[in-house]
Image (spheres, rainbow, N blue to C red):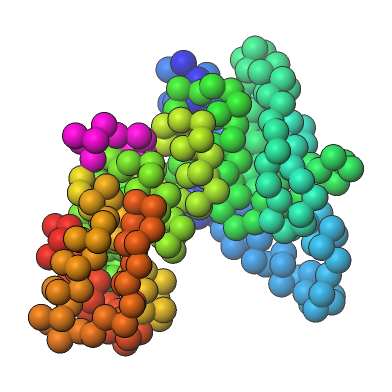
Amino acid sequence: MLLVQKFGGSSLADAERLRHVAELCRKARAGAELVVVVSAMGDTTDSLTAQARSITHEPPARELDAFVTTGEQQAAALLVMSMEALGLPAVSLTGWQAGILTDARWGDGEILAVDPRRIRRELSRGCVPVVTGFQGVCPAGDVTSLGRGGSDTTAVALAAALEADGCEIFTDVDGIYTADPRLLPEARRLTAIDTRDMLALSRAGSKVLHPKSVELALAGNVPLRLLSSFALGDGTEVMLLPESGRPRLAGLTGRPGSGRITLAGKGADAAALSEAALLLSKAGVAVKDGALGENSLTLTVAPEEQKDAMRIIHNGMIL
């Protein structure tokens, strides 16, 4: 069994959390071959970007990528040190060492191919490869960054290339909810969500998983699981569900202040759009616009009424 695990910056923010993640990896390694992908620690990427812009307001894109991607290299090396201290053999690999080939779009590179031979060699030696997320190398041999959320994309791309049995994304939330629980406390955690519905929510503004990573998971049929690195739990599985097990509406999201509310699910059709508009109308909330998308529907209300409108639709159509 081969497993890819990705740990976000909040999971690696300091020495204590690094040791905790190393222990999680040690436990996972007991039952499977393991590849780990890391983001930069805490707010390192923001700090590095600010440092570069303190030199010049418009740093050269190539050099900015070369600079900000050092955050992931620090995290990977420190995590390997933490793992080795527990007796778990590991090795840090940069994006280019891990065989991640991208185009040359600085700041928002696309993964073109993955050559996993170095990773397989390290696995055959009994090591855990700890790969820097968020980065690759373009055909000219230069480091490129994958844009925000790029570590998720790295993890899914590696899982697909290695034909892994699963890809686990560890973060500071314990799963995927029917809505943002910080906005709607009544939102419930999902045990599973269809990849198509997760993609619709991600594209509409949900911050749980980056759209590129979900697109890759859908294209490569990679099963994902979102878990918390801070609390034990089963998290939420992201996979292609049978239609019989796929809910009519899986959840909703909205970019704060935009007035836009997007619902995702197999039943996100014209009838559901009319139902949502009627619910809001009865509550005195005017709908300015409505549109259908792939596995989604979107309504637009006044920005100041967005949160109330989300609660009305969520409680009336999803719960």
The furthest residue to the top: 124
- Residue bounds of the magenta highlight: 237-246
In percent of the image, x 26 and y 31: which residue is there?
242
The image shows a total of numbered marks equal to 0
Q: Is residue 244 left or right of residue 210?
A: left
Q: Nearer the viewer, residue 264 or 59?
A: 264
Query: Taking 56 as reference, is 206 above or below it?
Result: above
Quarter holding residue 223: top left
Percent x, y of residue 98: 71, 31
Query: Taking 278 as reference, is 265 above or below it?
Result: above
- Tell me if residue 77 can be seen: no
Q: Nearer the viewer, residue 125 or 156?
A: 156
Percent x, y of residue 127: 63, 20
Q: Nearer the viewer, residue 144 or 204?
A: 204
Query: Taking 7 as reference, is 274 above or below it?
Result: below
Percent x, y of residue 195: 38, 41
In percent of the image, x 72 and y 67: which residue is there?
49
